[in-house]
Image: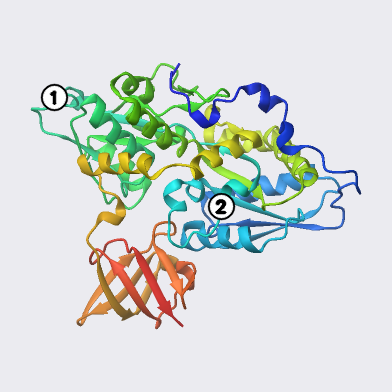
Amino acid sequence: MSRIRISLLAVGAGLVAAGFGTGLASSPAGAEVNFKGKTIQVIINSRPGGGTDASARQIGSLLIKHLPGKPGVIFRNLPGGGGIKANNYFYAKVKPDGMTVLSGSRSQVSPFKLRHRAAKYDPSQYRFLGGTGRIGTLIMINKKETARLTDPKARPLAFGGIDGERSGSHAAVWAKEYLGWNVKFVLGYGGTPALLLAARRGEIDMVHHQNIFNLKPLLKDNQLAIAQIGIRDPSGKMVPRKSFPNLPVLGDMIWPKMDAVAKKAYETWLADNVVEKWMALPPKTSDEITKIYVAAYKAVMNDPAYKTIAAREFGDDFGWIPAPEMQRIVKDLVATTDADLAFFTQLRIKHGLKPAGAKKMKTVTAKIIEKKRGGRRMFFKVKGKTHQIKVSGSRTDVLINGELSSRGKVKVGMECKIVYPGDGKEAKSVSCKK
């Protein structure tokens, strides 16, 4: 078992079992909360069709069955700025009357996202219902190339990635620094399917992934699992996944080699990687209403219908995070210091995994002449030559008339200011006028 403890989770499991304790004491006596005949709104801070959207609809549809009065539910997608638009709205505009819930994911509570110039919300003020835990990523290597991993004289192993912003790529940075892994990063794969196919074909030597159903073919083919980030147990330790009980946990491997500053930075990074999805009520929601929702969320996590869904999608490693732990996790992330973030940023640069914002950018103003895949690809002309950009739903800032928006709302014919590293690359921002 890992000796790594996430500081924000160090409070014993007894507090979890006892509920919110003094943090959610009963409200003064009043009318009993009942949602009969009402309709709850679930705001989803991403576009339809993604993982956050699916999770929100699955949990939200079951949540109402465990609320008193069994209300109806409507789902509202509010994408933009990688979740910033929805969180800004929820934080500043939504009434704390129990009629609106926000469903989000890890990135909106990440200290990196919270430092974005457009982020005007403080998630430590939310009243969390709970969350689902991330399934620990595995690091894999081509079985034929294991001898090169720690041989500094050998040709570096090609470590594949999509954009360098995923937990597996980050884990490799820690391993390069403290375990001497001889790897170089090969980024730019169009998505998970392309990345995994490249590993199976031998185009790259190392790859990372977490979904058990995609891992099995790789492990049966040419890949060998050599490390895992691990999953959080109730005490806050990082332990092996149930499906991979004998695979070493990265923290156990590097912890003895780190000084106090590095350990603190690693714990910060780890805390930023334990949450997958979450639900919350707005700030200042009463204790009485919050307790009802917390109990309902817990009931969903133990609902046979949801357990069936979770087992099908995540396997035996699925786990959830009770409300008190979510509250502590987010409070700790909000309190992350610039020094903690700077340590890992410099480590990335040292080992050739520069942050996305470190790329040299060019800025042009042009009309959008074509869109594909709902705005994931946009085309425009620069000095008579057609250029295209990739537009990420989470990493590209999309604005229309100065307001955060989603890529789907950018229309052909709009004049936009585009900041991007070059033709065919992912844009940093797309700012358009109607």
Label located before the other in sequence (1 or 2): 2
User: Residue at coordinates 33% horizontally, 41% vertically from top-left?
Assistant: 196
> Within 10 angstroms of label 2, few (less than 14), some, or many (20 or more) residues?
some
Residue 432 bears which disc, if any?
none
Q: Indicate the amino acid at tag 1.
A: Asp
Above or below, 262 relative to 41? above
Residue 122 bears which disc, if any?
2
Q: Quadrant of the N terminus?
A: top left
> Nearer the observer, disc 1 or disc 2?
2
Which residue is disc 1 drawn over? 151
Q: Secondary structure at mark 2?
A: loop
User: Residue at coordinates 73% horizontally, 35% vertically from top-left?
Assistant: 299
Above or below, 255 relative to 192? above
Residue nearest the observer in this picture, 366 or 148: 366
- Residue 15 x/y as whole percent: 67, 26
- Residue 256 x/y as whole percent: 32, 18
Residue nearest the observer in this picture, 177 or 198: 177
Q: Residue furthest left?
A: 153
- Residue 310 x/y as whole percent: 59, 36
From the viewer's perspective, tell me whether residue 368 is left or right of residue 425.
right
Residue 353 in view, yes or no: yes
User: Residue at coordinates 67% horizontally, 21% vertically from top-left?
Assistant: 14
Alpha carbon of mark 1 to alpha carbon of mark 2: how far?
46 Å
- Residue 24 x/y as whole percent: 74, 38
Residue nearest the observer in this picture, 154 or 266: 266
